[in-house]
Amino acid sequence: MKIRTKLALLVVSLSAVFLAVLLVWRHSEKNRAELLLRDREREKSGFFDKIVALRGASLQMLAYDYTFWDEMVRFVSTGDRTWAVQNIDASLSTYRANASWVYDTSGRLVYFTTDLPDTSARQMPLPPGVFRTFFAREHFAHFFLPVPAGLLEIRGATIHPSSDEARKTPARGYFFAGRLWGLDYLEELARLTESRLRIRPGSAAPQGADNAAREAGVIAFFRPLAGRNGRPAAHLEVEIALPIVQEINRLSKQEFGLLILFGSVMLAVLSIFLMHWVSVPLGQLSVSLNEENPAILSRLQNHRSEFGDLAGLIVRFFEQKLELVNEIGERRKAEEHVRTLNEALQLHATQVEEANKELESFSYSVSHDLRAPLRHIDGFSELLQKDAAAVLDGKNLRYLKNISSSAKKMGCLIDDILTFSRMGRNEMLKTKVNMTHMVNEVIQELREEMATRHIDWQIGALPEVEGDPSMLRLVWVNLLSNAVKYTRPRERAQIEIGCTQENPGEVVLFVRDNGVGFDMQYVEKLFGVFRRLHRDEEFEGTGIGLANVRRIISRHGGRTWAEGKLDSGAVFYFSLPQWKRVAV
Amino acid sequence: MNALKSILLVEDNTEDVELTLAALEQHKLANQVVVTRDGAEALEYLFRRGKYAGLPEGNPALVLLDIKMPKVDGLQVLRNIREDDKLKMIPVVILTSSGEERDMVESYRLGVNAYVVKPVRFNAFIDAVKELGVFWAILNEPPPGSISRRC
């Protein structure tokens, strides 16, 4: 899951938790408000009932006082209207009643009075026969009676003389007082109880107050108003507004709203900072790595945060990668170049090999085809000499001898050049060579040539070298036989063989003689093929020896050079790689 | 047992044939020599084919063989001799101008009896041919089936 998604989830879950806490808090607030409401409801309804009872008390008192009175007992029997007007009509305003009825024990209406314009209540719908049963258990009655003008509250009582305080004697008549629950009375009640009142006719209990009203801080309840038969004739609907509850609800709602706003702002700020601090840098790092584009991080890498460090590292990583890629590219190019060179070299080597093969077949031809005619020249001149010696003079015989010796000389030249060619192309078998042994052996071989000579040999300490023994042997044969040859004019020849070491890993060997020497201006000609500094009559030879020496030494990786002075001897040097013991 | 045995000389070069015969002549060996001028002719002689079809049976006591020749070279002739049941016991001496090692090695590998490089000096050549002739044609007992040619 992406960090961005995780952060979003985090923010969403924080919002959810915050919301849940808020809801729980709001629920408990509501509960508290509800408790408060109930408390106030109980208090208010109690208060309401007391007020209603208090207001109703005067009517009850009227019914109580007027029926415990001797004058009233007398009035039932006399029906004295003057007394009635003076006492009963006047009592209406005193007790805040609107109507009064007086019945005798037979149920006949003795007197009726009302201050209401509507006199429809004159005949209270109580059947005359029911009074006895109506007051059978109680001496007092209280009920409501709907009339066209509204609802009449009626209180009644049995009439007794003042001597009968306990109302034990039979009733002398019946007295009723009614009070109209009109708009005026209801308004008064409402004012006193700080409520809104409404009469709901009908005996069935109306629906209770709805929750919306409670939420708004209004408590509502009904008070049944009992009818004549005991069943409710109507209901009084009471609504009492509780401003404190309303205020609490309003404040609670406001707080809730503010908390929601606060929470949203906090979460928004958190989201923005998370985006800015984490999500955006992470996204940039990720995109930069995915697209391999460090330019995206140019601003981020200056941040003094872990992301800034990371961006710096990534930018450096990309720089190093670029360097590596370039280096690899260059290396590939170099390898390509090397391969091209190698191919060229391979081609060249093949060509050289072909040339070598051609040279080989050429020298084979030379050895076979050039020697044959020479042999024939010599053979036939020899045969001629044998057969015609008797008839030839001295000069002609000399000619024949010259032919023979020329042929012989040519044979030697051919042999020499073949040897020289072989030195150049034969495979070398490198091994450890002990120079002291080799030099002594070669000197032994030359003994015959030196039989009549007086030669002082000075042989220094010679090293072991790495090389082809047969080739190196030829080097010594050439150099030593030269030294012997060119010291021939000396009565006492001095030949010195030694070794010096100038560079590490390389030894320099030399042969010094006190022979005829040479002019240094011809020094380079010495090592050329068939190059000679002396005539044949002076010193015999074909001029191939030093050429062979140079070729062999250079094939061993060494150098050859010479120093000399005419008539004062010569030194021939050659260098070779030293024998490395570790190489064995 | 001093009877002279026949020698087959295989040599393309006229001068060499003449000089070889001259050398053999000095030792009275020339009469026993049959000369063929290249490898193909030598094989015709040895296998009695072509113009040699009518020859009586019998092998030479010695074959003197040059290497470098037209048509069939000496090494091929040597190979054919050694591969044939009737001819393989004939002594063969390579007599050549070539001192090349590879020729020498190949000749010995094919079973040559001797390898002689012709010396440039005539006197040395005469000595060499003489010794060869004396050894192979007089001293050496040829294998059974060789023919002798008397004068």
Image (cartoon, coloured by chain):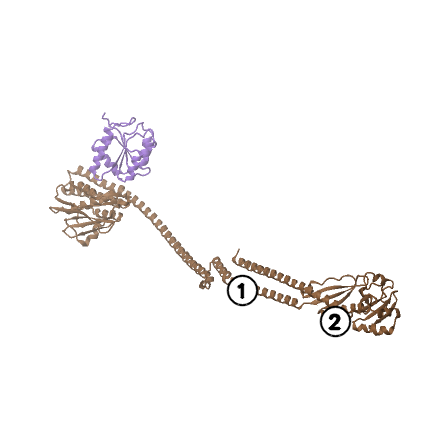
Chain colours: A brown, B purple
* B99 over A509 or under it: above or below: above
Label 1: few (<14), some (14–19) or many (≥20) C-alpha neighbours in 10 Å: few
Q: Nearer the viewer, residue A580 or A563?
A: A580
Q: Which mark is residue B127?
A: none
Q: Nearer the viewer, residue A489 or A208?
A: A208
A108 relative position to B147: left or right = right
A302 relative position to B7: left or right = right
Q: Which mark is residue A188?
A: 2
Rendered location of residue A55, percent (x, y) = 75, 69
For residue A238, which quarter of the picture?
bottom right
The N terminus of chain B, quarter of image: top left
- Tag 2, which secondary structure? helix
Tell me, yes or no, whether dots 2 and 1 are on the same chain.
Answer: yes
Q: Chain of mark 1?
A: A
Q: Amino acid at mark 1?
A: Val
- Tag 1, which secondary structure? helix
The C terminus of chain B, quarter of image: top left
Q: Which mark is residue A269?
A: 1
Q: Nearer the viewer, residue A351 or A192?
A: A192
Furthest-left residue in this view: A491
- For marks 2 and 1, the one nearer the N-term is 2
Instruction: Look at the image and tell me whether residue B52 can be seen.
Output: no
Confirm or deny contact between disc 2 and disc 1 (CB under 8 A). no
Rendered location of residue A551, percent (x, y) = 25, 48
Rendered location of residue B91, percent (x, y) = 28, 31
